[in-house]
Amino acid sequence: MENKQYELKVGLEIHQQLASSTKLFCRCNGFHSIGDEIYFNRILRPTQSELGKTDPAALFESRKAKKMNYIANTNTSCLVEADEEPPHEISQEALDIALTISYLLNSEPVDEIHVMRKLVIDGSNTTGFQRTVIIATGGKLQVEDISIPVLAVSLEEDASRIIEKNEDESTYSLDRLSIPLIEITLAPMKFKKEETEKIALTLGRLMRTTGKVARGIGTIRQDVNISIDGKNIIEVKGVQQLDMLTSIIEFENDRQENLVNIKNELLKRGLNKDDFSTKSVEVSNIFRNTESKLIKKVIQNNGKVTAIKAQKFNELIGKEKQKGTRLGRDISSLVKFFGYGGIFHSDELPNYGITEDECKEINNILNNQKNDAFIILTGKSDNMEIAVKSIENRLKQCLVGIPAETRTPTEEGMTNFMRPRPGSARMYPETDIIPVRITDEKRSQIKKSLPESYDQQINNYKQIGLNDKLSIQIFDSKYKSLFEKLVKEIDLTPNFIAAQLTETLINLSRNGVDISKIKDSDLELIFLEIQSGVIAKESFEEIIQNICNNKMKLNDIITKMKDNKLSDQDIEKIIKEIIIQKKDIIEEKGQESFSILMGEAMKKLRGKVDGKKVSDKIRELLDN
């Protein structure tokens, strides 16, 4: 990770859904999804800014010319999400949560908030833009002895949820669209492996102290800005797993270093931006009798084969010190956005059925010299011209070194090209929403109601009997608020409640049980019935499995357990029968026979009677 010439710096942007009762610009709730479904579609196009400029990221997305299909649920979306009705006033509840988090970061709220439109035409917004507003600036995040400056705190609407996509169209669900999302942008800092994930974790926990942020998969996402030269910034969007942050940053460091090395080598070979030239030629005729199955299939389907000259790039397109960092992979991910499967390049040929003679013919047609290379693009002729131009531009960008762009993470901890970095033309004012003033009264109200810190809340859990492990698990879980409510209202030990809400549910999830089907209200009712004695503690796991696997409804389970509830006399009779059967063992071991009797009793009574009740009855009968 150390580089004498360059210094790796990273800046984190954390996006967290807020658990407000409504969406940001309408009164729908995106967290309930039972209702009628409505379908419609759009084709989104870029618009110009107030200065008549077009954002490069929006322009790139528009070249795909995809049809966007949308699924709207009547319980989670309305005409606002469909862009058939103007947005309502900004949610005051979401604004209060954002202000609370701002003060926890010592960020100073702005005097007046002005909603802006940010161009996004990848289909994730029906309007072609995302609404966003700066809430506060400045402040700091303290992580042990490290102080990280906060650049800005913003409040914005979340995007639609992707359902499926192909090269011609994408389908989105609108349930998530416009859920309030807080964005916290931290200042860039020198990367240290052991610190980056800790910073993201600390910021996540600071937000969770409010009890007003959503939990679960997809509710928090990290964007990370990575640069080794301080100029050309790579933004990696949507890192959902903290343990992937380090891998992605290290991969980007290696990839960017490889690009710098390519630039330096091109300069050594006498190539510069002023005399850079490229050339592309259709070479389908060369491959009429090819042995390459892929190219043969393209030609049979009336596709095209195009060769692109890569001046001075010999042995640089396939150059790779670390896995996945080669330029060829970057170009391949670029053309995939135009519906192509990838590329061939001269550094890896002859191969894949492409012969040496075919390579020589391409070099001759392109008039390639010793240090020149070529790239082959195959596929349907639609968008071929745009894809070829994109390859040519990408080759030219190598003379810059690291092109500023937005990338997306992979499951393997690498990154792929997503789109160019947006420019200043991306933002312009929202004309449908009036500005909102942050009054002194509002500031004072928020400051007086700030939550306790993470350390204080963990200490509160310990004081009611939770150990360190359970305290952290329940704080980090999506059931934090439910746990705190149950501890106040139900006469069960906090340890038992916390263990079921964390360890038991986590184990079920790991074993393939879809615990997202269980509602907080279901869990609350289960604990109430355990308290009343209708449900045995040992039945918790089985009940959750039955509900989530659609075997039984909770009310039916409770009714059945009430009907089959054993009386104290029934319990005593069963235990007495076991004691008679084990008379010899009892005479031999006395009180030490308890564990044997308990095991036999639970074989018959597990899930029907609380274990402690069985234990107490066995000890009572043994004493007599």
Image (spheres, grey):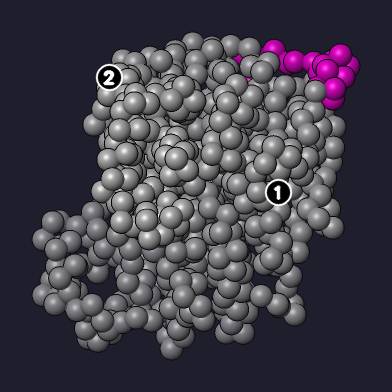
In magenta, the rendered stretch is 422-448
Look at the image and tell me in which quarter the N terminus lies: bottom right
Up-down: is 247 above or below 98? Answer: below
Q: Tell me the element at label 2.
A: helix
User: Is residue 522 in view?
Assistant: no
Up-down: is 583 above or below 331? Answer: above
Residue at 74% from the left image edge and 48% from the top image edge = 186
Question: How many marks are shown on the rendered structure?
Answer: 2
Question: Label 2 neighbourhood size at 10 Å, few (<14), some (14-19), many (20+)?
Answer: few
Which residue was labeled with disc 1?
A: 202
Which labelled disc corresponds to residue 563? 2
Residue at 43% from the left image edge and 88% from the top image edge = 370
> Which one is nearer the viewer's eye here, 2 or 41?
2
Residue at 11% from the left image edge and 75% from the top image edge = 289
Which x, y percent locates residue 564? 27, 24
Looking at the image, is mark 1 or mark 2 earlier in the sequence? 1
Indicate left or right for 190 with 344 as reference. Answer: right
Magenta includes 444? yes
> Which one is nearer the viewer's eye here, 367 or 551?
551
Which x, y percent locates residue 262? 56, 77
Tags 1 and 2 touching, CB below 8 Å: no
Look at the image and tell me in which quarter the C terminus lies: top left
Q: As shown in the figure, which amino acid type bears the numbered disc 1?
A: Thr
